[in-house]
């Protein structure tokens, strides 16, 4: 189940369907359920400058917004292929090069004393769901023509942040991320269904 966990770690709300295999670990990294978060300081904080300039001061009760989705796509933290969906980054040498030395670069459930109390439950629930789904269907594929809202290749352009848009679905956010209009798929039942 190591590969399944890698799939879950990568992405969570944008599923990539292939016959016999559904890879979805890079999903939490590229599409974290909570893409933007907020924290408040409980005491004054001084951040040193990363460029050797003036330090940055935050007084008590300052609200600090941070973007998990931007952090998860930074090439300085995840390597030159940070924008590519590749669940094997959680298994191969990139795990030891990027994530092990700095575990706070992966924040789909936050980290430290504020980590989501339901993290393990979410992993178990998603794993169970995916296993049962794949036991019952031999082929699951996206149906772009059925999508209420979808982008054509001519709509896919470079983003102001420099991200090459590859999604054909409209990813939106309220408190959590979702696909606008839902995600329409075609599923072929498996011949030998496991009960």
Image (cartoon, helix red, strand yellow):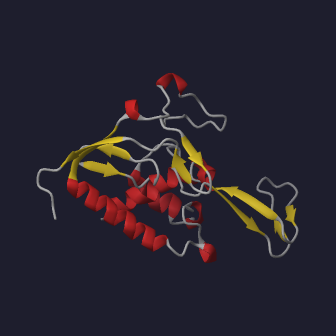
Which residue occupies 62% across, 36% down?
Answer: 162
In-front residue for pair 31/93: 31
Q: Is residue 87 visible?
A: yes
Q: How many circles with numbers are drawn on the protein?
A: 0
Name the residue located 54 percent from the left edge and 76 percent from the top edge: 117
Residue 91 visible in the snapshot: no
Quadrant of the drawing holding the C terminus: bottom left
* Location of residue 173 with respect to 90 vertically, above or below: above
Q: Quadrant of residue 4?
A: bottom left
Indicate the quadrant where residue 47 lies: bottom right
166 w.r.t. 1: above or below: above
Left or right: residue 186 versus residue 96 is left
Residue 174, position in %: x, y? Answer: 62, 52
Image spot of residue 184 (x, y percent): 38, 41
Nearest the viewer among 151 and 39 is 151
Residue at point 44% right, 52% down? 26
Work out which quarter of the rendered image holds the N terminus and state it.
bottom left
Q: Quadrant of residue 132?
A: bottom left
In the orientation shown, which residue stands out farthest toward the top?
154
Q: In this view, does 58 lie to the left or right of 137?
A: right
At x 58%, y 72%, the residue is 115
Query: Residue 194: where, in percent of width, then height?
Result: 15, 62
């Amino acid at each position: 189940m190591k590969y399944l966990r890698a799939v879950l770690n990568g992405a969570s709300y944008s599923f990539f369907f292939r016959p016999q295999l559904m890879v979805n670990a890079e999903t939490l990294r590229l599409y974290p359920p909570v893409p933007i978060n907020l924290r408040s300081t409980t005491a004054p904080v001084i951040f040193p400058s990363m460029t050797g300039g003036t330090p940055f001061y935050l007084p008590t009760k300052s609200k600090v917004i941070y973007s998990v989705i931007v952090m998860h796509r930074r090439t300085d933290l995840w390597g030159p292929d940070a924008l590519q969906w590749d669940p094997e980054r959680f298994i191969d040498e990139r795990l030891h090069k990027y994530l092990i030395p700095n575990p706070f670069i992966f924040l789909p459930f936050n980290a430290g004393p504020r980590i989501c109390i339901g993290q393990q439950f979410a992993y178990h629930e998603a794993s169970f769901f995916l296993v049962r789904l794949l036991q019952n269907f031999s082929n699951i594929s996206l149906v772009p023509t059925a999508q209420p809202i979808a982008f054509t290749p001519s709509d896919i352009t470079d983003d102001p942040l420099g991200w090459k848009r590859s999604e054909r679905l409209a990813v939106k956010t309220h408190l959590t991320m979702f696909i606008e209009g839902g995600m329409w798929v075609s599923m072929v039942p498996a011949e030998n269904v496991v009960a």
